[in-house]
Image (spheres, helix red, strand yellow):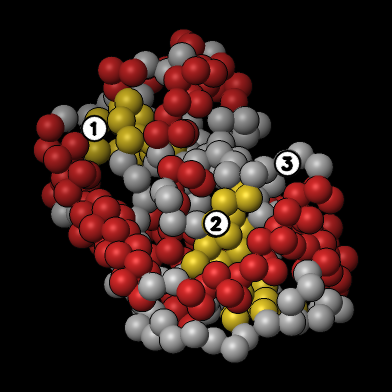
């Protein structure tokens, strides 16, 4: 399979929601500068989804002579934009922020009744904190939670999986040995959007500076309670809704913090007012559904 991560998902939505006539006037490259040729007869846009420190883009941005090669830079969060502005002095007059979004592939929760045992879910790549989460699950005291893990390098395509997945085999195997943890492997995005609402909580002990983090936003939009670290753009994407665990570089210390947060989840989740969860879902539908995101793109593309 070809790569189908957050960038590819958002590009698919862009072409689904924004008119072909508008998109035909521009040349959009995602994340990696000049991975597709610049075109002299179109407005060249770099749509930035990747972290500022990635080796396939850092040298290009570090050279200021490159900055005016693109007519516009579109960033997926204010956090990402500020990082590029401060580190690379990216031109502010040709930069703007348009956030990522979700669409109606995402099925949302309708049942918020108290549960005897909570269903937790982790849906990210293994290097984004899965090791910390497994350490936390080994330490928890409660028996009222069960965790499903959908994690693989397959999301970035067959070739990437072939060259990278072996280094995480021990982590996957460890997940299979921990009580109340189920390692599910890879699940494609469309299928995940159909089942996400069946879970109660999204758990993400991030050890990676997220530029936006689509998975957390989708979980909150679906009506899940989120527990996440306050690293990178997570605070911007997740607003005031999650339980935030302060990020610590010491993974053992971070895992203890997450274990404590997981232990309180059964009482916390079962005490949440249904109206509060519906407000959370409405917030994301109002600001992050692609019916809204498309209006920002249309306004931008009509104005250039």
Residue 302 image position (x, y, % from top left): 12, 38
* The quarter of the displayed image where residue 37 is located: top left
Is residue 7 visible from the viewing direction of this image?
no
- Residue 67: x and y in percent read 42, 17
On screen, residue 42 versus residue 28, left or right, reads left
**What secondary structure is found at the residue carrying circle 3?**
loop
Name the residue that disc number 2 marks: 243
Indicate which label's residue lies in the foreground, 3 or 1: 3
Residue 42 is labelled as 1
Camera-side residue of 162 and 290:
290
Q: Earlier in the sequence, mark 2 or mark 3?
A: 2
Q: Quadrant of residue 78?
A: top left
Q: Which element type, helix, strand or loop, lies under badge 1?
A: loop
Residue 77 screen position, x and y as percent: 40, 39
Query: Where is 274 relative to 128, above or below?
Result: below
Q: CA distance from mark 3 to mark 1?
A: 45 Å
Where residue 109 appears, as percent x and y from the top left, is 38, 79
């Amino acid at each position: 399979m070809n790569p189908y991560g957050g960038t590819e998902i958002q590009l698919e939505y862009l072409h689904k929601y924004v008119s072909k006539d508008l998109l035909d006037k521009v040349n959009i490259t995602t994340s990696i500068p000049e991975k597709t040729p610049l075109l002299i007869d179109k407005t060249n846009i770099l749509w930035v989804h990747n972290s500022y420190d990635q080796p396939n883009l850092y040298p290009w941005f570090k050279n200021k002579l490159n900055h005016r090669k693109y007519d516009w830079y579109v960033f997926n969060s204010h956090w990402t934009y500020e990082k590029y502005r401060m580190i690379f002095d990216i031109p502010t007059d040709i930069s703007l922020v348009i956030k990522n979004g979700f669409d109606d592939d995402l099925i949302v929760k309708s049942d918020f009744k108290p549960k005897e045992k909570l269903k937790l879910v982790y849906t990210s790549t293994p290097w984004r904190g899965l090791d910390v989460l497994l350490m936390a699950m080994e330490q928890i005291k409660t028996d009222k939670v069960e965790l499903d893990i959908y994690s693989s390098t397959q999301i970035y395509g067959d070739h990437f999986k072939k060259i990278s997945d072996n280094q995480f085999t021990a982590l996957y195997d460890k997940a299979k040995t921990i009580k109340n943890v189920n390692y599910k492997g890879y699940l494609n995005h469309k299928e995940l959007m159909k089942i996400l609402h069946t879970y109660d909580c999204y758990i993400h002990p991030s050890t990676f500076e997220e530029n936006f983090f689509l998975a957390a936003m989708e979980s909150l939009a679906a009506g899940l309670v989120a527990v996440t670290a306050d690293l990178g753009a997570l605070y911007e994407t997740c607003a005031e809704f999650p339980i935030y665990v302060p990020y610590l570089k010491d993974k053992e210390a971070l895992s203890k913090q997450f274990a404590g947060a997981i232990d309180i989840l059964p009482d916390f989740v079962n005490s949440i007012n249904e109206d509060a969860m519906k407000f959370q879902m409405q917030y994301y539908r109002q600001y992050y559904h692609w019916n809204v995101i498309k209006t920002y793109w249309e306004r931008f593309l009509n104005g250039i």
